[in-house]
Image (tube, coloured by chain):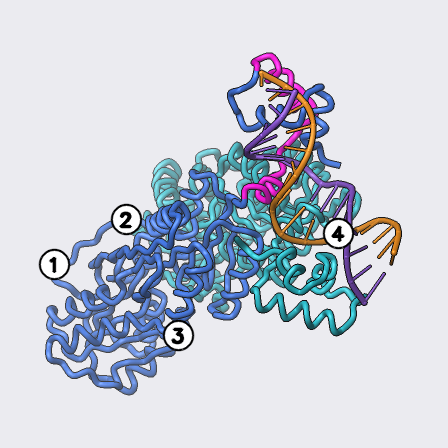
Chain colours: A cyan, B blue, C orange, D purple
Amino acid sequence: MPVTMRDVAARAGVSIKTVSRVINNQPEILDGTRQRVQAVIDELGYRPNAVARSLVSGRSHSIAIIVPDITGPFSPEFVFGVDNTARAEGYSVFLASTRGDPEEEVEQIERLAAKQVDGFILYGTRLPAEQLRILSTHHRMSIVASRKIPEVALIRLRSYEGLQEITTHLIRLGHRAIGHVGWSAGEDRERVDGYRAALMATGIEVDPRWIVLSSQRSVEAGHLSAHKLLQQAPEITAITCFNDAHALGVMQACEELGRRIPQDLALVGFDDTPFATLVKPKLTTMRVLSVELGQMAMQQLLRVMAADKPYHEHLEVGATLVIRESCGAQNATAPIGINSSL
Amino acid sequence: MPVTMRDVAARAGVSIKTVSRVINNQPEILDGTRQRVQAVIDELGYRPNAVARSLVSGRSHSIAIIVPDITGPFSPEFVFGVDNTARAEGYSVFLASTRGDPEEEVEQIERLAAKQVDGFILYGTRLPAEQLRILSTHHRMSIVASRKIPEVALIRLRSYEGLQEITTHLIRLGHRAIGHVGWSAGEDRERVDGYRAALMATGIEVDPRWIVLSSQRSVEAGHLSAHKLLQQAPEITAITCFNDAHALGVMQACEELGRRIPQDLALVGFDDTPFATLVKPKLTTMRVLSVELGQMAMQQLLRVMAADKPYHEHLEVGATLVIRESCGAQNATAPIGINSSL
DNA sequence: TTGTACGCGTTATCAT
DNA sequence: ATGATAACGCGTACAA
């Protein structure tokens, strides 16, 4: 049914190869024939079949992004960044959400590998390091994570250092009993660990009651965790959070409990989601440049795909502390949120 | 380099066709041979090449979602809904952001059509109705929009009726001078028009000064529009908005101008983004079930793809008024936001 | 039950 | 400069 090169060739009275030359702008061809063939192409509305091309060339000019949850805090921005760079380089983008299920992650990789995608970007993968190393030997991929994963192409988000910085900031403001509303799944515990490290570095012993972990990253999860935390450790004067969503949940809980922020309790988030500037008090948090992160990941993947041997590379990306109102910092400055557009 | 059916066949001492039968679970085969072949498949780590399959079958088991902006207010949820249903049906999903550029929209469709995707979902397309009609004859597609578009498979979001309902609600609360902070692009003016219609139905003449349109849909755009609106028409006592982002911008402006919400000014949004319940006062808005919308679109596309002739179908999806605090309704109830998870 | 041979639409290698 | 023909990896008549 669709028009093929053969149809064009027949109609133009030339061979298939000549049509191929015209399509691919190859030089060895008379201007006359080229124009004649081009005319037929336009007339018949011929469009090259990329699948047939892929079969021959072995390259699909498609890549895949695997994310746990596209609706997550900055997945959309990340995907946007990847998508931009990908298209600029002539790649189409497959997107797959795995709901944080490691098995589904593997399934999707298999399925898309069968479709001959040229590369993968794994964002916030839940797979263990060893499995990622093996996958990296079978498929070209760039991994974006907070963990350190050996022998892969990785962009590491410095979450650990981020929470270290946040916590240290609170310590400098005079806080000693600092709680953490956190999250954990698989090997990813960077943020809690950064929080712990900062306290220990100052010689403060971390009371286990100060930490409440959840397997969710929603506002509601933060809300529940905060209630539990403030009940079992009422002495705390500051709370660090896994992300802004958790922080917002904490704010709700504080309102219910009558604890004022920042007077009675200092609070900091992580991610600098658009919410941060829209709540009262404005949320102190760590800013992550997600769009840029996506661009970096795609660029790294391009290098991985271009290399003819296994290519490992570790890049690190920091998060910057954005001091607003919720932490009660004296010299509070309030930068304009870059994520403020819906 | 990769293992092919031929390799498996040779190693197992059978023909290619026999391997094919094992792969596709066809019955006419001895259990003995099946197991022997399967063993070789596992041993060699053979994986079928979906590209070659596509070339033969003409079906790619891939579909494409085209959105103006993946980071938009409910694009992620929509994509999530599509993705879920798609995977359940064995489809992989291409995603392409067009930044609202109609030309890029067409380019992406062409590019992905060349890759033989089995269908398209166009979400919030900026293309004119006539062009969409033509595209629908060339490609299987489901279109999600607020407009009415003839002769295509469409899921229409009842934005017009939504703004009608919102505005009527405000009129019932006693407001007469009602403004609109809006957006327009291409043929899509449903929301302003719904607002207008409601006022006119009550016999209120719409003062042009009451309407400020912007080409952006960000908080910042709403902020600017609100300043302009309140300056040129200070008499208004209520504002309807294109979306929640605009409404948040209006809130910022009101704070700067010292106009209290809802006492001095009633305010309503549209979309019921997670923000809505997190700001003070909580935002009255229209809820759109984006995930479900995505599922519907994919299901419609499945019908379009299954049909052997052009298949047109018009579905409509409403938005529900969620009354919170910002509109100053007496009998305010405050449903729990369903979008509250980050 | 199993195998042979051809076709899917394109690119690439050789001739001419 | 152009063309015949063989791949690419798989499915499918049709034959054995």
Q: Amino acid at mark 3?
A: Gly
Residue B21 coordinates in the image, percent (x, y): 57, 25
Residue position marked by numbered label 3 in the rendering: B186
Q: Mark 2, mark 4: which one is toward the viewer? A: 4
Q: Using a 10 Å C-alpha cutoff, classify the residue at mark 4 as few (fewer than 14 neighbours), some (14 to 19) or many (20 or more).
A: few
Q: For mark 3, give the secondary structure.
A: loop
Residue position marked by numbered label 1 in the rendering: B331
- What chain does badge 4 belong to? A
Q: Main secondary structure of the magenta part?
A: helix
Residue A200 coordinates in the image, percent (x, y): 59, 40
Label whose residue precedes the other's in the sequence (3 or 1): 3
Q: Mark 4, mark 1: which one is toward the viewer? A: 4
Q: For mark 1, give the secondary structure.
A: loop
Q: CA distance from mark 4 to mark 3?
A: 41 Å
Q: For mark 2, give the secondary structure.
A: helix
Residue A274 visible within the image: no
Q: For mark 4, give the secondary structure.
A: helix
- The reply to the same-chain question for discs 3 and 1 is yes
Residue position marked by numbered label 2 in the rendering: A256
Does B283 sit left or right of A19 as displayed? left
Marks 3 and 2 in Cβ contact (< 8 Å): no
Q: Is residue A105 above or below residue B311?
A: above
Q: CA distance from mark 2 to mark 4?
A: 56 Å
Quarter of the view holding residue A78: bottom right
Q: Mark 3, mark 1: which one is toward the viewer? A: 3
Numbered circle sitting on residue B97: none
Q: CA distance from mark 3 to mark 2?
A: 46 Å
- What chain does badge 2 belong to? A
Residue position marked by numbered label 4 in the rendering: A306
Nearest the camera: B261 or A41? A41
Q: CA distance from mark 1 to mark 2?
A: 23 Å
Residue occupying the point 65% across, 57% down: A5
